[in-house]
Image: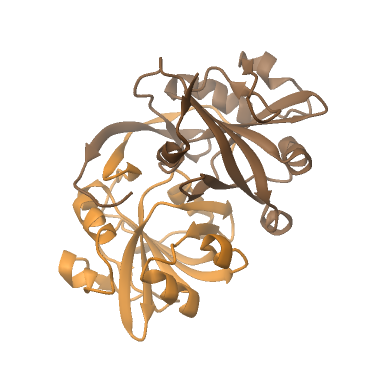
Chain colours: A orange, B brown
Amino acid sequence: MKELPLSKVYQLLEPGPVVLLTTARKERANVMTMSWHMMIEFEPPQVACVVSNANYSFAALRAAGECVIAIPARRLATKVVKVGNSSGRDIDKFAAFGLTKMPAARVAPPLVAECFANLECKVTDRRLVNKYNLFILEVLKAWIDPTQKNPKTLHHRGYGTFVVDGRTIKLKSRMR
Amino acid sequence: MKELPLSKVYQLLEPGPVVLLTTARKERANVMTMSWHMMIEFEPPQVACVVSNANYSFAALRAAGECVIAIPARRLATKVVKVGNSSGRDIDKFAAFGLTKMPAARVAPPLVAECFANLECKVTDRRLVNKYNLFILEVLKAWIDPTQKNPKTLHHRGYGTFVVDGRTIKLKSRMR
């Protein structure tokens, strides 16, 4: 994994990819699948996300205030669905689905080695947690796997249906 | 436009498409381009979004508390960028870029006739507006254009680069 400048993080999350979210509690790491997230600030990058209080990850995220957002490419689609269909209450999902934990630099939850990008995050605002399960995160450090060239991400359409990234178009724009 | 059940709205926004946001103030409608949004609840559908206070739409959204989220398909890409590169302070973007206003049923801001989906929304929570420009919306009514079959949406990657929806894959899943 190679470090990615924080100013480029929004380009990874703004297109709306399905991501994995890792947490850690009492030395035990867990991973879930997440599609409800958005950028809210460019730099330092801040992200809002919803982690349902029905998810096992919710308590770990709220208590420890740390997570890693890992972005999987197309080839991980089957594992992404398996992660989303099981709970860390019952199994060790890393072992069960062959996902490799790598130590993060700034937070306790692990990076996911198979993902092409990993974002180390801390919770910075809990005001909307009780009502909406909505956490505000700041990205502390970002990693990218330079060996995965032009990864295609997945976009969830509900009930196991995903749209895979198609072609890229470039239009003249002043928009960041 | 045909009415879409509110329970299906998340399938439109969860994949992370670039959208248009219309507002209205003092009888004058405006439209902006937005990529920072996410679902936060299935039904009734609730959405979080960031509208920068540097945008002309910000004051209208905060004051009137109503908007329409309109989802453009690939063929509107050039207009989407033009909308994003100009301000309602200076021009009437509907007229300038050939976008057609249609009356909404529950809110004052207009639908955009050229978009394949339109979501009428009201602001329901302003607690994070001051700090993050983050609005919580509830979708009151949803419309879909049945003549636009399998529309491909756009996903912004920064600076006028967009990824267009590619192929759809279906995996066995219990995930909603």
Residue B136 lies, with reference to residue B1, above or below; the image says below
Residue B107 in view here: yes
In the picture shown, does residue B15 fall above or below A64?
above
Quadrant for the N terminus of chain A, please: bottom left
- Numbered-mark total: 0
**Is A103 placed above or below A152 here?**
below
Tell whether B20 sits left or right of A161: right
Give the quarter of the figure containing the C terminus of chain A: top right
For the question of whether residue B16 can be seen, the reply is: no
Q: Position of residue A24 (x, y in %)?
A: 37, 78
Image point 61% across, 16% down: which residue? B99
Asked whether B39 or B15 is in front, the reply is B39
Answer with the quarter of the image where residue B11 lies: top left
Left or right: A129 with respect to B62? left
User: Where's residue B163, x and y in %?
Assistant: 40, 35
Residue B169: where, in percent of width, then height? Answer: 23, 38
Instruction: Tell me: B83 left or right of A62.
Output: right
Can you name the residue that lies furthest to the bottom here? Answer: A26
Residue under the point 38% across and 73% down = A23
Residue at 20% x, 45% y is: B171
Percent position (x, y) of residue A145? 31, 58
| Residue shown at 70% from the left, 53% from the top | B126
